[in-house]
Each structure stands twice: as structure tokens, then as C-alpha cells.
Amino acid sequence: MGRAGDGAARSLNPKAALSVLEELGGLLPVLPLPIEAALAYREICMRVEASQREPGDAALRDRDLWLAAHARAAGLDLLVEDRKRHRGVPGLRIAYLP
């Protein structure tokens, strides 16, 4: 919701966009950020930095790191299309789309 809120605030009609986002938030459950996901995110970021892969490039963007952290913390497989993007993320189980 944070990224969506940022996009709504920057839109041509922020008041209307934020109103729609607030309505959407009432329809969808927004789960709290588990501490395990926050810790996994930090570890993944540290490893990405240490390997000199840039999270802002085509390899791993910030949203990809958050998805990886949530999946890893919850013990879930991350379903992806791009076989290269999440390669090397420690402890992440990846399932590929056919």
C-alpha cells in the first residue's frame, strides 16, 4: 500500500486517487509487516550490496527484495517468471512459471 499511496499522491488528481486507494484498502486485508520479513529484507539487501548487484537495476529492484523477504520469512515459494532475477537470494525458495 505504501507504493500505491506514493503513486496516488503523485497522480494528476491525488485527492481522487487517494480516495480510491482508501476504498480499496477497506476491501483488501492489509497485513502488518512481520519482524521476520523486515529482518530478511535487511539481510537480503546486505547480501545484494556485498555482491555489488544494484537493487535499482534490472536484476533486483526494491519491490523484488520485499517480495523475496516476505516469501522467505513465511517459508513460502516465490512464484516468478524471470529465472535470473532472484537467483542467489539466500534462503529463498523459487518456483518458476512454465
Image (cartoon, grey):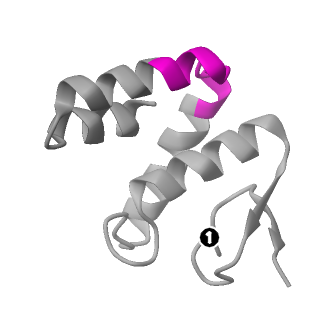
* Res 9 quadrant in image: top left
Residue 82 belongs to magenta span: no
Tally of numbered tags: 1
Tell me the residue that label 1 is attached to.
86
Q: Within 10 angstroms of label 1, few (less than 14), some, or many (20 or more) residues?
A: some
Please state which amino acid type lies under the numbered disc 1.
His
Residue 39 at x, y percent in the picture: 57, 32
Above or below, 8 relative to 82: above
Residue range corresponding to the magenta coloring: 23-37
Image spot of residue 54 (x, y percent): 33, 69
Task: Give the answer, above or below, for where 43 lies relative to 87.
Answer: above
Give the quarter of the figure containing the C terminus: bottom right
Q: In this view, does 15 lie above or below 91?
A: above
Q: In this view, does 82 lie to the left or right of 64?
A: right
Q: Which residue is drawn at 54% across and 30% down?
A: 38
Please give left or right for residue 54 compared with residue 32 in the image.
left
Identify the residue at image location x=53%, y=25%: 24
Position in image of residue 96 (x %, y %): 81, 76
User: Can residue 31 be seen from the camera position used here?
Assistant: no
In this rendering, position of residue 87 left or right of residue 56: right
Quarter of image, res 74: top right
Front residue of 94 and 16: 16
Percent x, y of residue 87? 65, 75
